[in-house]
Every structure is written in structure tokens, then in C-alpha cells.
């Protein structure tokens, strides 16, 4: 079973340190949730794991399949089996959802085998139809331009469809619940749950317990001041929902990030 190991990760942006020694291991088949107040480094962690160029790693390593992924480009990390669902997915006018997904899938196949001619269109259509049925998505969705004119819920469902198509071993969901009403949240969470298996580990980043009512975590971690300061089971998220973060701040004497 694969796992991603984050060891003593320190990250800065514009010479300001955001992450101050994050240690975390996420295994295939398990759901880890990271919670914490605004500005504590949760999204910074997600972007760093995927290789966003604005974030500078000053110390630490991230090991996946025997490699330090911090030395790899974002596309190499993706091909290795890491996936990031964005908090704010961008629109790509003129590119349909289907064409985007087929291009991404073919890029991954050709990276593994330069002689691969890509997935045949009939095979891709059949696969995409099966994935959309699994996620209870209308088939017309595939013909729309990616995220153009999409509602918040539709953008997040498009991210989950990408995850279903690329079948990562480690999926990072960066505040997938952001901007969603309760119905859209349930639909997106149902999609994630439909894809969960022993072959995929999930790192869920969220502010609120409500998402974890639908995507059940095995472990919950609290981030404060750029570090993970508290870890526990699902009950920890319920305690945070009831008590807020003040007791965490008092316990760990948060220093401004």
C-alpha cells in the first residue's frame, strides 16, 4: 500500500513563513481531515504538495513511492498518483469537459509509455459514461466548456469527475465544501464516497465539521500556526464544532503566522 509522508515541512511565500514543520502520513484506503482557522496554512499545504511555484520549501521532504516529490514538477507528481481538487477551479473556455479529461488521461498514458497512441475514442466514451453514471451526473455535462458558467457545485463535481478519471492513489481535497449549499455539498460528498476504495487515500482540508458528516474521516488533525498540533479520531471534529478553536489556541499558544 502506498502512502505519502510529509516530514518537517517548512514553506514560505514572499519570504513569510507559513508552514513551520508539518509532519503527516496519509495512507491509501484512509481518509485524513485537516481542520483549522483561516490563515493557518491548510491550503498552503495542499498547493505545496502539488508543486505551486509561488510556495518556497525551505526545509523538509515529502516522500511518495520512494521519491521526494518536492523535486518533481506538478505534472510529474500527478503522473505519480497525486491529485488536487482545487478550492477555486478555473474556467477553460472552448475546451469541453470530455476533451480536457481525454487529454489529461492520454498525457498520463504517454508519460508511462511514449509509444502509447492514447485511449481510443469509443473506449474513452464508454469509460466516461460509466464514471458519470457512478457519480450520478447528467451525460450532457461532458459536452460543456470546463467550468464556464458552472455553479459552485458543478465546478466541484467536475473536479470529482477528474479524480474519477485519473484514479489517483492520494487525493487532496482543498476546501471542497467552500461556497456550496447543503444540497450541492451532499452531491459532491456522495461522489467522493463512491470513489473511495482501499487503493485511494484522501486528505480533506476543511474549516467545518459539516463536510465530515458526509465524508467520514478515519483521522482528524488540527493545524494552527503552520503546524499540526492535535490529532485524533472523528470525535475531534465534533469537539471543534462545539467548542471552536479557542481551546486549541490557549493550549498551544499560537504565534501569529
Image (tube, grey):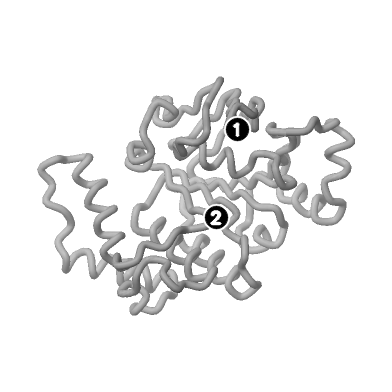
On the rendered image, what quadrant is the N terminus found in?
top left
| Residue at the spot 53% in from the left edge and 26% down from the top edge | 57
Badge 1 is on which residue?
Answer: 24
Q: Which mark is residue 87?
A: 2
Label 1, residues with CA under 10 Å away: few <14, some 14-19, many ≥20: some
Label 2 or label 1, whichever lies nearer to me, is: 2
Q: In the image, residue 223 lies at what x, y percent?
A: 71, 39
Q: Is residue 2 left or right of residue 113?
A: right
Q: Looking at this view, is 60 or 212 the one in front?
A: 60
Q: Looking at this view, is 214 or 15 the one in front?
A: 15
Q: Secondary structure at mark 2?
A: loop
Q: In the image, residue 73 lies at what x, y percent?
A: 36, 34
Q: Looking at this view, is 78 or 146 the one in front?
A: 146
| Residue at the spot 64% in from the left edge and 31% down from the top edge | 19
Q: Secondary structure at mark 1?
A: strand
Q: Is residue 152 above or below residue 235?
A: below
Q: Which mark is residue 247?
A: none
Label 2, residues with CA under 10 Å away: few <14, some 14-19, many ≥20: some
Q: Is residue 145 above or below residue 45?
A: below
On the rendered image, what quadrant is the C terminus found in?
top right
Q: In the image, residue 206 lies at what x, y percent?
A: 65, 52
Q: Looking at this view, is 202 or 174 the one in front?
A: 174
Q: Residue furthest front?
A: 14
The answer to which quarter of the image holds residue 179 is bottom right
Q: Is residue 32 above or below residue 224?
A: below
Q: Is residue 68 left or right of residue 185?
A: left
Give the alpha-carbon distance from disc 2 to disc 1, as whole Å.
21 Å
Marks 2,1: beta carbons within 8 A:
no
Q: Is residue 256 left or right of residue 212?
A: right
Q: In the image, residue 80 lies at what x, y percent?
A: 35, 38
Query: Which callout, 2 or 1, points at the residue further toward the start of the chain?
Result: 1
| Residue at the spot 56% in from the left edge and 64% down from the top edge | 189
Amino acid at each position: 500500500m502506498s502512502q505519502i509522508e510529509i516530514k518537517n515541512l517548512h514553506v514560505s511565500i514572499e519570504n513569510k513563513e507559513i508552514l513551520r514543520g508539518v509532519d503527516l502520513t496519509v495512507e491509501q484506503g484512509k481518509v485524513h481531515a485537516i481542520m483549522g482557522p483561516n490563515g493557518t496554512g491548510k491550503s498552503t499545504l495542499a498547493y505545496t504538495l502539488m508543486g505551486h511555484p509561488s510556495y518556497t520549501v525551505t526545509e523538509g521532504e515529502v516522500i511518495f513511492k520512494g521519491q521526494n516529490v518536492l523535486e518533481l514538477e506538478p505534472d510529474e507528481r500527478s503522473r505519480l498518483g497525486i491529485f488536487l481538487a482545487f478550492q477555486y477551479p478555473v474556467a477553460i473556455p472552448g475546451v469541453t469537459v470530455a476533451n480536457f479529461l481525454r487529454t489529461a488521461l492520454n498525457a498520463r498514458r504517454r508519460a508511462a509509455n511514449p509509444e502509447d497512441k492514447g485511449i481510443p475514442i469509443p473506449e474513452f466514451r464508454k469509460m466516461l459514461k460509466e464514471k458519470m453514471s457512478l457519480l450520478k451526473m447528467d451525460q450532457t455535462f461532458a459536452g460543456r466548456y470546463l467550468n464556464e458558467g458552472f455553479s459552485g457545485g458543478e465546478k466541484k463535481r467536475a473536479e470529482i469527475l477528474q479524480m474519477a478519471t485519473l484514479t489517483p492513489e492520494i487525493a487532496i481535497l482543498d476546501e471542497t465544501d467552500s461556497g456550496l449549499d447543503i444540497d450541492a455539498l451532499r452531491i459532491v460528498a456522495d461522489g467522493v464516497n463512491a470513489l473511495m476504495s482501499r487503493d485511494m487515500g484522501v486528505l480533506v482540508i476543511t474549516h467545518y465539521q459539516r463536510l465530515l458528516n458526509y465524508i467520514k474521516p478515519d483521522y482528524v488533525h488540527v493545524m494552527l500556526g503552520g503546524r499540526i498540533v492535535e490529532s485524533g479520531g472523528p470525535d475531534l471534529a465534533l469537539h471543534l464544532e462545539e467548542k471552536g478553536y479557542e481551546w486549541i489556541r490557549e493550549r498551544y499558544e499560537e504565534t501569529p503566522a
